[in-house]
Image: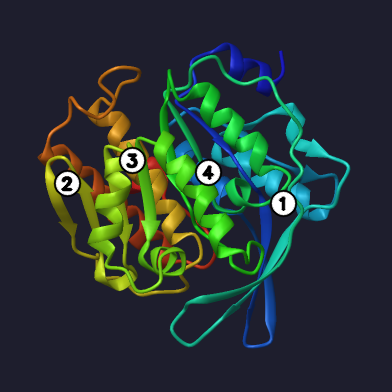
Amino acid sequence: MSQHEESTAAHVDALVVGEALVDEIVTNAQMVSHPGGSPYNVAVGLARLGRQTLLHTTIGDDDRGALLRERASASGVALSVESLTAEPTSFARATIDGTGAALYDFTVTWRPTPFHSVASPRIVHVGSIGAAMAPGRDLVAGVVSALAPTSIISLDPNVRPQLTADRDETRWRLEELVTLSDVVKVSDEDLQWLHPGRETSQIAADWLARGPDLVVVTRGRLGAIGYSQWGVHHSAPTITRVADTIGAGDSFTAGLLSALLSAGVTAPGERLARLDGAQISRSIDFATMCAAITVSRSGAQPPWEHEVA
């Protein structure tokens, strides 16, 4: 039985659907390649935290693809067999500025193959390029629609204006997914691109009214704010030396979802309703710690379970 067959036949904590690509990081005229892509990073983060994770993506039979497959395997992520394609592996050239922030230039295709999904993963996570870029965004939307009745749906818009420049269409498509989601994690920068000039709290309130139980806004060095039926939850940033910020938001998402699984989120029916404000706050704090560990090292390197025990 293959790794994919084992994962689909057995219990799966998380199904992640979205892009995988290689980050080619340029600093001081040197270039280093790291596995990346927002959904890919979330899958790696979840698996490293001990969650059985299946990723459906697109990875080519080339050197970049080998790098992605090696990281996934070493981290415990199972790839669907349909993830392997004849197209070249996507990549992003990331130039690091003096603050450690990354500026991206993408060479990406997103044409995922339909796949045999897990019957009822506890969590389904989508977002970023995979949720917004044609033609694969339709497959992502279909997976979410099919599994929303039985799984917790997680969304991170993680917008990439270089690839999805039509703001109105991107906003419409992402907010269709917001309506089907239970947990939305979004950066303050993404909110300002999607809704220029609007207050973060107003957007979060609008999104909560659409359906999610929890909207968490990350604010870099300022920490994170969670909005839910239990009120507003602030998480102060962990003080750390910043190597770069690549993968920090994805590590936050993986930490948040893993903590919510530990707290006992269920679907269908109760969703996050059985949790309380203290559990939500602890989950956001745990996610903040995971992100802080990630920014302290180069590339998207989310923590392992033993590092956050």
Query: Which residue is found at the position 67% from the left and 22% from the top?
Result: 4
Closer to the camera in the image, 306 or 185? 185
State whether residue 278 is above or below residue 25.
above
Counting from the top left corner in percent of width and height, residue 253 is at: 40, 48
Q: Amino acid at mark 3?
A: Arg
SS for callout 1: helix
For the residues labelled 2 and 4, the Cα–Cα distance comes to 23 Å
Answer few, some or many: residues within 10 Å of disc 4's Cα (few below 14, many 20 plus, some between 14 and 19).
Answer: many
Q: Which residue is mark 3?
A: 210
Question: Reading the chain from its start, which is encountered first: label 3 or label 4?
Answer: 4
Q: Which residue is mark 1?
A: 67
Which disc, if any, is residue 44? Answer: 4
Which disc, if any, is residue 281? Answer: 2
Q: Quadrant of residue 220?
A: bottom left
Q: Amino acid at mark 4?
A: Val
Q: Nearer the viewer, mark 3 or mark 1?
A: 3
Q: Amino acid at mark 1?
A: Leu
Closer to the camera in the image, 184 or 296? 184
Q: Amino acid at mark 2?
A: Ser
Question: Reading the chain from its start, which is encountered first: label 3 or label 1?
Answer: 1
Query: Which residue is found at the position 32% from the left and 30% from the top?
Result: 261
